[in-house]
Each structure stands twice: as C-alpha cells, then as structure tokens.
Image: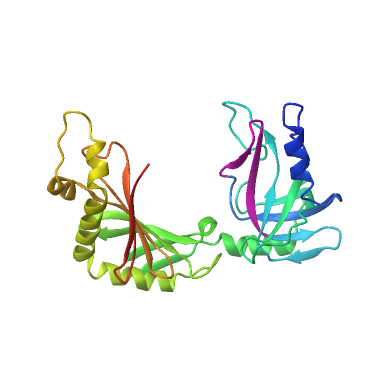
Amino acid sequence: MEFINEQMSKDIVDKFERGFEQEDFEMLFLTVETVGGALQLGDTVLQPSLSFIASVDLRTNTFAKEKGRLEWLIPVIKDKPGWGYDFRRMNIYHIRCRKSFAPPVDKYFGQCYMVCEQINDGATDPRLEKLKAKLSKPVYIDDPEIGHLKLNMEYSCFEGNIDWLGQACPVSLDTDREGGKTAKNALAHLKTVCSGREEWDKKFRDYAVAQLFDTISSQVFEGSEITLEKLHQIIHISSFSIDSRGMITVYYSDDEDVLCGHAIEIMATTGGVFVQADLVG
C-alpha cells in the first residue's frame, strides 16, 4: 500500500493485509460516495473506506453492477487533513487492489477490496460511463402537499424542506431500497404526519419534556431558571427524517441556549409509539 511507513504499527498493518488475497490486480471502480472518515486502529493507523456501485475487472473485462467497499491504511498524522486518496463520488478510478477473503455481508454491503495503488491514467469503460451518466441525472419528488425534494444518491434519501407550522423544516426521506430512486413508502408516512402537524408537534414536545426535563435542568447555566412550561415553549423542530417503515427521527432545538448547544433527538413511529428521546450534540 502506498502510505505505509515505519511509524505505523507493523502488527496492525500485517493483520489488515492478512484479510486480503495476496494477488494484486487492476480494476475500475465507480464510486458512490466521498471519503467521510476513517476507523482508527491503535495509535498510529487509520483505515479509511468508501463505497462503489459498479466495477470492471480488467483481467477478464467483467462488468459488475454490484455495490462494494474500498479500504486502505494511512498513518495517523496530527492536524493533517485528508484520507490519503482524494476519491470523490460518481467518479471512475483505476486501482491496483486485492480482494478480501471475507465474502460479502449482504447485497448492500458488497465485496471489499484493499487499495494498493491508484493509477492515474484516465482509464475508463463505456459501461461504467453509461451508468455514471444515468445515476448523475438529478431525481426529484414534486408533491403538492409536501413540496420539492431532491435525491441524495450518496445517502439514498430525498432531501428538501417542508412547512412545519409556518417554519421551514429540513426533511429527509429514505428511498424504498438502498440505491433506489423512489421514496413512495416514506412519502406516504410523511403525509400521514403532516396531516396532523399540530398534534404531532405537541406530542413531540410533551414527550421530550417528560423524558428529558431533569437532564436538561441539571445542565442549565448557573443562575438560569427553567420550568417544564418554559422548556415546552422554547423548543422548536429543526429537522425531520422518516424511513420506509414509518420510523420517525426528529430534532428539536432552542434559540435561548437553554440546551447549551445540544439538541433533542426523538424517535417514534407513525403509529404513535414513542421509542426514545436523547440529548445529543
């Protein structure tokens, strides 16, 4: 691998590499996300990763429209940004790699490969280019009740804003399946909630206050006072998401810093079952 150095724990590097076959070979990958982070292995090693949505094995010219994952190691360097490779979503990369011994966990997680080297020769494939063009076209939901939502392919959700009692509220709807382009189920659940916004808003506030008042009041700045009624009044919805099963996750925040920079996360179902409320952030 390109970034291995003497400062990295040899035991960790060796253990990682033993998870992959010894043969190096070349493939083309169409990525579906950017690198957003890494798993830290001990004090000296980071393991970044990202997902791809299709590939071509250049040994056999075999095209596979199957999701998978790329992984590699880089040293921990304090205050140095980046993840070794500057991989971006919806790009085709020529990579020398090794295949993981572990079989795919499921059809969504897919086969894993270790990145040995990025080959910057501009290599591509018409089948990957065709898929890239198809997936790069914007997809929208335009609904007279809900409004205009745009597909975020990277996270398999539609995003936009809805009117929540006169306030613009960011909303996220999970697609009907991983990598899909519809959110019919989540949209139907959202409409159920939006048809009774006032009742739902009260339920969210009531539940948050009942579950978290003691926790919040114990964290208020010295000299401040908070009551159940005031907390119920000052919190307001800040984001809303819902999946295809009807599981709701909402966040409530405040403008008076009573929450000390935190937010309230509430999980419930469209059937009216409240699951939990936490102070987060």
User: What secondary structure characterizes most of the magenta part?
Assistant: strand
Q: Is residue 113 visible?
A: yes
Residue at 22% across / 55% down in the picture? 205
Residue at 23% across / 64% down in the picture? 200
Foreground residue among 150 and 39: 39
Q: Colour scheme used in the picture? A: rainbow
Residue 102 left/right relative to 170: right
Q: Quadrant of the C terminus?
A: top left
Residue 109 left/right relative to 5: left
Tell me residue 196's x, y (percent): 22, 69
Residue at 22% across / 46% down in the picture? 213
Where 114 sits versus 8, above or below? below
Residue at 19% across / 63% down in the picture? 198
Q: Quadrant of residue 168?
A: bottom left
- Count every numbered label the image shows and give the total: 0
Q: Is residue 120 visible?
A: no
Residue 69 left/right relative to 122: left
- Specify the segment rendered in magenta: 36-53
Q: Is residue 159 magenta?
A: no
